Every structure is written in C-alpha cells, then in structure tokens.
Image: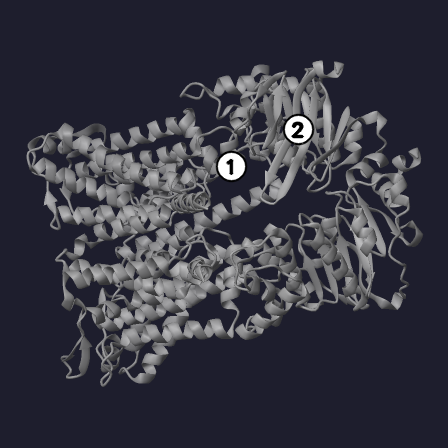
C-alpha cells in the first residue's frame, strides 16, 4: 500500500470491448515516479490497446485512470497531452519536411507569428541538455530514425510530460543508437519522469527497466520487479505456461527425413531486411521459425519467397539451383506464402471472396488464360466448403468477413495453387480458437499429403503441436535448431531467451 | 427476401445507382418539359440515306468520343488512382497522324484508312506508354505526369501536319464520321458498341479486370501474389492510348478535317467526370466500365437538355458544374457515413418501437 | 572569428536544391540569350516586359503553390481570374467605383476559395474534382455575363491602368536616338507584394507552417495538435483570394474582359510551381521558387520567339520539355532522399 503513495499513474480495472472481442478485461497498471516500466506481452495480449486507452485514441469501457492521484478523463490525444501523458510511437509522428525546432514547437505556439530564432534557441538548449545529437535548424528528415525519435522525446519533455510512453522505440535502431536512447531514458528517469517502455527485445528490458508488467489475452498476468523475474520466467509468463506444466507437454512424433528428400535449400540467403541464413526443408516436413516479434523470423521467410529485395545467397529446389528474386518466381517453383500482415499484404479488401481465392492461381496461369467465371465459382464453393469459410456468399467482399474467415480465404488462395511448399506467417494471429485448431489440423494434413510447410506463430504451444523442427531466431540471427527430444517448451524458451538466462536455472 | 434486395443494393448495383438515377432524372425531366424530346424519326440525309434522327440519337451520337475515352480512363483510374489529363491533346496527335497518313497517299482507299488507323493507334500507344512510364516507373502522380503531354500535345499535332486545319474529303471518312450508306445508325455509335464489346472480350479472355482492380486496391498484396504492378499500370495507359486514337479518328471523321487546336478540346475534364459519375472511385480500385459509359451519356444528355432549354452553349459549363458538385457531395465519404449512421439510428429506433410494442 | 565558425551552414534542403537549380537555369538561360540573341535581352525593359505580361500568372502561381504544399490542387484559378476580369469590367462600365470593383474582385476570389475549401477539407472530396467543378462554374458564369469581349470604358480606371512606374536611368536609346525609359506596371508591384507577403505567411506564421506540416505528413500533423481541416480550408481560401487579385491585375494589364481570358493559366501556374521546386507530393515548396519558376517559363518562351521560331507550337513543346525535365528531376531527388533514409 505504501508504494501507491509514490505512484504517478494508476489505471484500475480497465476494460475495453471491441465488437465480439474483449480486448482488455479488468487490467490494472501502476507507474511510479522516476521508474522505467516495461509492458510485455505477445501479439494480441492487449498492450497496444492499453496504450491507446491511455493516450486517448480509444475510450475505455470501464475502469478509471488517475495521474498524481487525481482522477482524469482522457477523450483525445490532446487530453492526454494536457494531462502530462506523452507518447512516442514506433512510426515517427513528426513532419519530416520541417526543421527539428519546428517539430518540437509546432501545434503549441501561442502567437500567430512563428519566432524561428527563439524556438531554435530553446530547442538547442533542450537538445543540449538531453544530449541529443541534432541541430535545431536541421531538417528532421535528414536525421537518423533514432534522432527523430529522440526529437519526439524532446518535444514530450519540453511539454513537461510526467508520463512518457515509448511504444517499441528500438525496433528500427542499431545497437549504438539504442545505447544513446537508453542514456536519454536514464536521464529522464533522474528527472522524475515515469516511462512506460513497450518492446519485444528481452535484453533491453533487463538492461533498462525497473519493473515489468505482463499482459496476456487482454488480462493482467502480474507486475514484477525486474531483478526478481528471470528471463525464462518472463517468457513463460508471456506465453502463458508455467515451466513445470510445460515440460510435460509432448511434441509431435518425430519423423525421419532423408537428405534426398530435401525440397528447398538456401545457403547464406539474405535480403534487404534479412541477414544471411542457411535453411532447408524436406518434402512433407513441417518446420517452424520461432523467436519473439522482430527477431527476424518473418524477414527470413519473406526472403525465401522473394518478397523483399534479395541481396545474395543461393537457392536450390529439389537439388536444382534456381533463382528466386520476386514472388512470381517462387510461385512458379511451387512456393506459397501467407503474409504476416493480413490487411496490408493479404486481402484485396473490395474484391469478392471468389476473386480473392482465385487470385494467386490466376497469376500463375498467366494473363492470357483467365479462369472462367463458372470454374472460379466452383473453386470458390469448394474451398468455402472445405475450409468452412463463413461468408454470406462467394460474392461478398472479403473486407466484410471476420479476421479468421479472411485468413481462411487467403489460405484457400494458396491451397488452390497446390503448392509443394507453403509458408504460413502467423496464420493464427488475431483469430478465434476454433479456427486456430482448424488451421493447425490443416497444416498436419498438408504435410501428410507431402507438402512442406513452414509455420510461424507467436504461440509456442501451437508450433510444438505442428512442427517437427524449430529454427529459433533472436536479434535477426538463427540461434538454434531444435528437434526430437529438444522439442519442448522449456528448451524452446531457453533458446529464445538466450544463453545467459538458460544458465540461471 | 428483404435481405436479398439490400444485398443487391450494396453489391454490384450500388455502384451504378448514381449514374442510373441521374440518367432517369434527366429523362423524366425532359419528358415533362417536352414529351416529344425523345421522339426518334426517320429522315433522309443529304446523301439520300435513310437515317435515324432526333434528340436521343444526337445525344448518343455526340457522346461517342467521350464514351470511348471514358472506358480507357476508367482503367487508368482504377489501376493508378489518378487520371490522364492529356487525352484531348493525345487525340489531336492521333488524329493528325491519321490525316497525315491519309494525305501522304495519292487517294484515300479502304486500305489507306486501315493503315492510317493502325499508325494512329501506334502513335497514341507510344504517347500512352510515355505517360505510363512516368507514372508506373517513376512514381509520378498521373495528373502531373500527363501535364507534360497536356502542355505540348497539341503543338506536336500541329507539327505533324504543319497547317492549321487540313481537310480530308472522302466518302470513307464521311461514312466513319456520320452514316454508312444503308445503315440508319450513326457510325460513331456503332464504333462505341464495337469498342465496348472489345473491352468485354478483353476482360473475358485475359485477367486484366482482376489484376487492375487488385493493383488499384492493394498494391502491396498484389505484388506478393506475383502481379507485376508496374506492368499493369503501364498497360492501362497503353490501352487508354488506343481509346484516344479511336476517339481522335471519330472526331476527325465527323468534321472531315483536323484542327489540332479544337479537336476534342477540354474532353479530358469530361472524361474524368464521366468516370466519376459512373460511380467509380477516383482513388482507384473496383471499377465498372458500364458506369463510365452511362456517365458519358449523362453528361451529353445534360448538355443537350440545357441546349433544348435555350441555354447558350457557352453557358452550359456553369450548370454542369452545379450538377457535378451535387453528385460528388452526395458521393463524398463524409456524407455517406453520416447517411449510414442516420439509417442505423432509424433502424434502431424502429426496433425499439417494435420492442416496446411487444 | 571563432564566433563565425560556430555558425553551422545547414546542407541544402530538397526545396533549396531544386530552387537553386531553377535559378541557375534561369540565369544561365538569360545570359545565353544575351550572348547569342543580343537584341532585346540586353535591355532591362525585357525583364520588365516579362514581369508586366506575367504579373497575374505570378500571383496565381503563388496561390497554387500554397495549395500544392498542402498536397492539394486547384485548377479553377485561371477560370476565376477570367470571371473576376469580366465582372469587374462590366461593373466599371456601368459607372462603378474603383474601390468597390477591387472589393468585388477579392470577394469573388474569396467565395470560390471558401466553397472549394469547404468541399475539400470538410467533406473530404478530391480537390481535383472540386476545382474542376469550380473551373466549369467560373467559365460558365463568365460567358453568362458576356460572350463578347468587353473593353473597360471608365475614366478613373483608365488612369489607373496607364499609371506606370517610369525609371529613366534603366531605359535604353532607341534606333532613332530617343531615350525610351523603362516602364513597370502597377500590377507587377502588386504581384511582387503578393510574393513577399505569401513568403512571410508561409515562413513565419503558424498557419503557414501548418500548411507544410499537413503536406509533410497529415497524420503526424494531427498528432502534433494542428487543426488539419481548418488549415487546409485556409489554403484554398488564400488560393481563391489570390485568384481574385490576379484577376484585377489581369484587367489592369489588358483593360478588357474576354471569355477566353487566362485560358490554360492553371496549367501554366502548376508548371511554374513545379519548376520552382514545389514537390507534387506536398510539404515542400516556396513562393520565391515559384516566382523564378514563372520567370524561367517566360524566358524560355521569349527565347524561342526571339530565335525566330515564331510558330507558337515551339513554345509549348519547349515548355513541355522543360516540365518533363523538372518532373523527372524531382522524381530523382525524391527517390534519392527516400533511399538515404533507409
């Protein structure tokens, strides 16, 4: 109880409902003066919803928020700022075409005229104090992303913020830049600013944070002191299994593959987003890329599909060297890829379910051999039935379907091309449990039919249930490959968490 | 049953609602104003052909160039989320090339007309490809990219023939521009029908429609599904080039001369307008060619109605502007969402009443 | 000395770079014209003539620059200019007051700006379509007012029209030995004033910086606490107001109203803005650049005419070529910038 006297921000019994989903249920969160508090959780755990409630982007459907012991109502981002809550988002929300000084002061000038000199002086002073390597007269777009982020922080600091939310600020920074950012955070901490730090880099949490709050499935798991929570435990809490419980889990039965069965093989494959890596998959094998978000798992599979610019490496399919530089190359070699971001890279929102299903097959058949309407309709009907897609009709625009059904349509799109190798990047994200199980079953069935599958999921349990081999990634590097007896949750988590943490046990 | 009807409204029919309502309103208005407005008669023209005549025929006839251009413009709009403002200038170039080829031979024969048509198409396709390259490869906004050709297109047309207006006098050209002997329907109308059928066939025998829509709605996802977005965008501009050539040739044939200054002047604005009235989103995505064609006829019917009401031809623009504003305001996202909100509120209230009644 | 060293010179921004290129090309072209074509280009009057002829274009281009900075477009400016000329001519010919005629010009411009601004920013309709309707409406109204050209017959206005700033020492000696003093029209003063005022508005006011902010990144601007809708609205209002001023200046230059006045002016203005370094994607631009863009455009035309290429089609082909060059230049600068970021 004593602790609460120092608390700067209190969120009590926060609820947030979205149509059909309870995004937050009865979540508490406490931030104390001068502390760095990590907010952890996997995708869909509710961290971003909680942040958005706090910054006024969403309205909470229940619960109360108080700053410095005073109850407040946050209805807009403006409200949040006026109450001393500032946010620095992963995507920079500044104007790249204006100077650093302008970005710090625009939107909160009091006079009609803009006194550039005055602002520049003030900006230089703040930048100097915080040790941010930027000049006030510089155009923001010419600064590195790290500096842009720091300018956003400087703006927040100058607005006398009490609570500073950093939403995945380090995901696009390199080590040196992260260090500078951390120095800045420590400095702010010394000034009594409370910092909420959202990240998926575990090392960084242990380096800078005093406390950790873990969310899972929209519920509070708990609040812990960083030194009292070993890294492995943290991963377990995020994923939602206790270690004892985990070790008893059995993986899929082991399959043996001959080297002659290798369907796809890449050596030192690298793209504009992925560091060089080696990889091979057998016919009928299900393997997984695991690691926390941002570990490079998606980037690696995108490189296999040729989705990003390929920088180097050799690729062999069935032992034959091939060149895959764009998606169509991969598709012609029997590779299908279900993208991680369904909205951005998957669905064509205004087109019907039918058109979305036949799209990939149509592309492969070529421009001059269109699939006839009746053929397309029978394909659509078939897959709507096989995958149990809930849609009013095959002509309904895909955008009006629920997330799970959209995902099934995209799955149908790739199944229709009868791929030899299917890459599924987070196929179960943001969809209901029933559909998740259906997709898992489907993956196993595909493997039985001789299709190679790469499966990525944030839920390790799901991966263990489907994959016979797991490639573990951390900080954009492959850090381990687990199969057979090693394929259990404890071992996976230890590998994800890293060597040091594993030793702690 | 009720659901089915609302589905129809929300689905395919929804896009055509505005153009169809617009054309119906114009028809009803005209019928009230002058019941004989739409009477179609049979007369003999100067050449002694039996031809159809009447306001309706002249509306459909006069809108031919616009209808052809609107079809091509729809594709460009869908794929590139922008419009080509150089179609008028490009049509002048195509028309000039057409006349140049015709004039270079000793006499105008059927063969030379076909040759001239092919060359005009090629010229227009090259200019279309130029615009398309700027848009798809260099990522320049379509309107700005086509501003270049808009600025200098008519001068290039002038350069091709050297003179201000070159007449072409030939029965074949006359037949293209007005009537083919023995057929009472104006030839330009037939050309529109042929072009529309070709579009239909192209959509049937290629995946152009699906790919264009995909690229326009979600470029990133299209790319990940193996569609070459750059190529599709370029292709739409080249197709528009063909439409431009056809429109230019109709225009030249109608007048029997090429005037690079006035041929299809300001048609680009009307073509974009036809696309918008046709219910197509100017921001790209799903499209309906039929909507654009109706849009073209709406514009011409409006024009002819105004003429019939003794509005001077020069003043028509002002009234047109008012109609455009009304149409776009009705179609604006803000008004639409307000309307939907209002409708759901009404529905809720009805339900409440029904609940209370129970 | 040390103090001076501390002053750090910022590297050129995109706009400054594009503008510098434009100014260099302008100066280079002009010098070339003097060296090769001699003749008129040697006289200051040549520059003055270019200004006299293009004062209204400069004003309209400034307005378009503002709108383009907010990532919008307004193609009604030429038509509004023409409407203003026609209404003012008719009003003056009815024995109207000069002061009222100026108010009339400003009022028409403001009205167009306000309506279009409302439709674009509050109803979220595409600016191209809105201003297309505006263009049709203004052109239509002009012809409704009068199809025939109308000449101003108003004593006070004629005096105003004939008032020129005469600078004898910048003049030249004609062939017959008479001294021809350099003459500058009042409209040019208005145009230069507009450039300066808009320059200050864009650079030193909250509103002006808001234009840049919403052009740079609309979502960010909203997050930074800018009223995006209102700011965008004012961009169109300012553009409309400048079209009104441009109309009056146009009338002071020609002294007559004609339905085909200022035909194609909107496209020339867009071209001038682009050549002056306004980025089509918004957020970058500068009226000083636009001014030089207009002058560059005019110089090209003058050079073409003076080179004996009298056919008018040479003018527009060279303009098109220049436009193509500058648009591609922008595309290259833009892609280079985005690459650097990665």
Q: Which residue is mark 2?
A: A13
Disc 2 sits on a residue from what chain? A
Say which quadrant the C terminus of chain A sits in.
top right
Q: Is residue B47 visible?
A: yes
Q: Is residue C115 positioned above or below B110 on the image?
A: above
- State left or right for residue A232 relative to residue B157: right
For the residues marked 1 and 2, what is the alpha-carbon distance in whole angstroms? 31 Å
The quadrant where residue B71 appears = bottom left
Q: Looking at the image, which is closer to me, B327 or A97?
A: B327
Q: Looking at the rendered structure, which numbered label has been put on residue C219?
A: 1
Please provide percent x and percent y for residue B200. Answer: 43, 73
Res B103 quadrant in image: bottom left
SS class, disc 2: strand
Quarter of the image holding residue A182?
top right
Q: Which tag is nearer the camera, tag 1 or tag 2?
A: 2
Circle 2 crowding by C-alpha within 10 Å: few under 14, some 14–19, many from 20? some
């Amino acid at each position: 109880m004593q602790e609460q006297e120092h608390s700067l921000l209190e969120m009590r019994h926060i609820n947030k409902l979205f149509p059909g989903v309870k995004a937050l249920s009865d979540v508490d969160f406490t931030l104390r003066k001068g502390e760095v508090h990590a907010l952890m959780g996997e995708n869909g755990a509710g961290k971003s919803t909680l942040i958005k409630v706090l910054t006024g982007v969403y309205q909470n459907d229940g619960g109360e928020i108080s700053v410095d012991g005073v109850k407040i109502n946050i209805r807009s981002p403006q409200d949040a700022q006026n109450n001393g809550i500032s946010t620095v988002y992963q995507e920079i929300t500044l104007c790249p075409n204006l100077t650093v000084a302008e970005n710090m002061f625009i939107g909160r000038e009091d006079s009609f005229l803009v006194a550039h000199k005055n602002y520049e002086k003030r900006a230089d002073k703040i930048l100097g104090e915080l040790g941010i390597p930027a000049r006030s007269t510089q155009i923001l777009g010419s600064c590195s992303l790290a500096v842009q982020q720091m300018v956003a922080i400087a703006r927040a600091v100058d607005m006398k913020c009490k609570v500073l939310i950093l939403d995945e600020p380090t995901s696009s920074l390199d080590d040196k830049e992260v260090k500078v950012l951390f120095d800045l955070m420590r400095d702010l901490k010394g000034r009594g600013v409370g910092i909420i730090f959202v990240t998926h880099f575990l090392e960084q949490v242990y380096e800078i944070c005093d406390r950790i709050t873990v969310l899972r499935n929209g519920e509070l798991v708990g609040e812990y002191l960083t030194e009292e929570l070993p890294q492995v435990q943290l991963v377990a809490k995020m994923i939602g299994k206790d270690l004892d419980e985990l070790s008893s889990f059995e993986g899929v039965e082991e399959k043996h593959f001959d080297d002659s069965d290798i369907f796809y093989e890449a050596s030192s494959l690298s793209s504009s987003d992925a560091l060089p890596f080696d990889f091979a998959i057998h016919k009928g094998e299900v393997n997984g890329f695991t690691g926390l978000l941002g570990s490079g798992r998606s980037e690696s599979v995108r490189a296999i599909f040729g989705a990003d610019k390929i920088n180097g490496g050799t690729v062999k399919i069935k032992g034959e060297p091939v060149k895959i530089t764009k998606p169509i190359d991969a598709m012609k070699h029997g590779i299908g890829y279900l993208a991680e971001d369904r909205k951005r890279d998957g669905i064509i929102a205004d087109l019907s379910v039918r058109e979305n299903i036949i799209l990939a097959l149509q592309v492969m058949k070529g421009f001059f051999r269109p699939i006839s309407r009746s053929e397309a309709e029978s394909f659509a009907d078939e897959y709507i039935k096989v995958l149990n897609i809930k849609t009013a009709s095959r002509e309904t625009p895909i955008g009006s379907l629920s997330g799970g059904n959209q995902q099934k349509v995209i799955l149908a799109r790739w199944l229709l091309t009868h791929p030899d190798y299917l890459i599924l990047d987070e196929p179960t994200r943001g969809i209901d449990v029933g559909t998740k199980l259906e997709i898992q079953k489907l993956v196993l069935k595909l493997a039985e039919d001789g299709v190679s599958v790469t499966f990525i999921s944030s839920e390790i349990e799901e991966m263990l249930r489907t994959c016979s081999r797991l490639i573990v990634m951390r900080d954009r590097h492959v850090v381990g490959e687990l199969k057979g007896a090693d394929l259990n949750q404890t071992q996976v988590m230890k590998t994800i968490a890293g060597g040091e943490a594993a030793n702690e046990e | 049953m009720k659901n089915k009807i609302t589905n129809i409204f929300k689905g395919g029919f929804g896009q055509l609602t505005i153009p169809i309502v617009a054309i119906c309103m114009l028809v009803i208005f005209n019928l009230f104003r002058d019941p004989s407005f739409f009477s179609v008669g049979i007369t003999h023209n100067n050449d002694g052909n039996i031809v159809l005549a009447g306001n309706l025929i002249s509306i459909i006839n006069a809108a031919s160039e616009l209808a052809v251009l609107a079809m091509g413009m729809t594709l460009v709009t869908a794929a590139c989320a922008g419009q080509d403002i150089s179609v008028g200038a490009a049509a002048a170039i195509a028309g000039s090339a057409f006349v140049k080829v015709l004039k270079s031979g000793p006499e105008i024969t059927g063969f030379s007309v076909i040759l001239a048509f092919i060359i005009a198409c090629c010229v227009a396709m090259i200019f279309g490809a130029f615009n398309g390259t700027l848009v798809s490869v260099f990522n320049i906004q379509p309107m700005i990219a086509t501003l270049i050709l808009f600025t200098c297109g008519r001068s290039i047309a002038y350069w091709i023939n050297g003179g201000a207006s070159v007449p072409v006098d030939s029965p074949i050209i006359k037949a293209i521009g007005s009537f083919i002997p023995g057929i009472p329907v104006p030839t330009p109308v037939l050309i529109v029908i042929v072009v529309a059928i070709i579009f239909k066939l192209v959509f049937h025998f290629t995946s152009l429609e699906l790919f264009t829509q995909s690229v326009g709605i979600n470029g990133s996802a299209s790319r990940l599904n193996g569609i070459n977005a750059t190529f599709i965008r370029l292709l739409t501009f080249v197709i528009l080039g063909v439409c431009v050539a056809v429109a230019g040739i109709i225009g030249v044939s109608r007048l029997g001369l090429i005037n690079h200054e006035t041929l299809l002047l300001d048609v680009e604005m009307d073509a974009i307008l036809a696309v918008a009235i046709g219910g197509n989103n100017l921001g790209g995505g799903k499209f309906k060619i039929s909507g654009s064609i109706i849009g073209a006829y709406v514009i011409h019917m409006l024009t002819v109605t105004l003429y019939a009401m003794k509005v001077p031809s020069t003043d028509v623009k002002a009234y047109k502007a008012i109609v455009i504003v009304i149409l776009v305001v009705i179609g604006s996202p803000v008004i639409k969402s307000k309307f939907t909100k209002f409708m759901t509120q009404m529905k809720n209230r009805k339900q409440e009443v029904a609940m209370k009644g129970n | 000395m040390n103090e001076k060293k501390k002053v750090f010179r910022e590297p050129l921004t995109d706009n400054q770079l594009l503008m510098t290129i434009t100014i260099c090309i302008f100066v280079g072209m002009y010098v070339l014209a003097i060296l090769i074509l001699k003749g008129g280009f040697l006289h200051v009057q040549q520059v003055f003539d270019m200004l006299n002829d293009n004062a209204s274009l400069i004003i309209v281009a400034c307005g378009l620059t503002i709108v383009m900075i907010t990532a919008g477009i307004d193609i009604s400016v030429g038509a509004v200019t023409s409407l203003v000329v026609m209404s003012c001519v008719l009003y003056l010919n009815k024995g109207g007051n000069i002061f009222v005629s100026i108010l009339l010009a400003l009022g028409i411009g403001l009205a167009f700006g306000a309506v279009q601004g409302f439709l674009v920013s509050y109803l979220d309709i595409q600016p191209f379509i809105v201003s297309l309707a505006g263009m049709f409406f203004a052109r239509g109204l002009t012809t409704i007012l009068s199809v025939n050209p109308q000449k101003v017959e108003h004593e006070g206005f004629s005096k105003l029209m004939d008032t020129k700033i005469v600078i004898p020492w910048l003049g030249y000696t004609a062939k017959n030995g008479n001294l021809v003093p350099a003459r500058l029209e009042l409209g040019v003063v208005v145009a230069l004033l507009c450039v300066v005022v808009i320059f200050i508005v864009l650079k030193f006011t909250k509103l002006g910086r808001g234009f840049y902010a919403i052009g740079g990144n609309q979502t960010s601007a909203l997050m930074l606490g800018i009223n995006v809708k209102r700011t965008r609205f004012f961009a169109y209002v300012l553009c409309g107001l400048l079209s009104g001023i441009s109309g009056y200046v146009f009338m002071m230059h020609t002294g007559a109203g004609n339905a085909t006045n200022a035909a194609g002016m909107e496209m020339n203005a867009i071209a001038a803005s682009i050549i002056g370094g306004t980025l089509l994607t918004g957020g970058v631009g500068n009226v000083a650049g636009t001014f030089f863009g207009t002058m560059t455009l005019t110089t090209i035309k003058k050079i073409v005419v003076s080179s004996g290429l009298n056919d008018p089609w040479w003018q527009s082909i060279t303009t098109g070529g220049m436009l193509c060059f500058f648009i591609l230049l922008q595309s290259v600068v833009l892609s280079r910038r985005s690459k650097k970021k990665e």
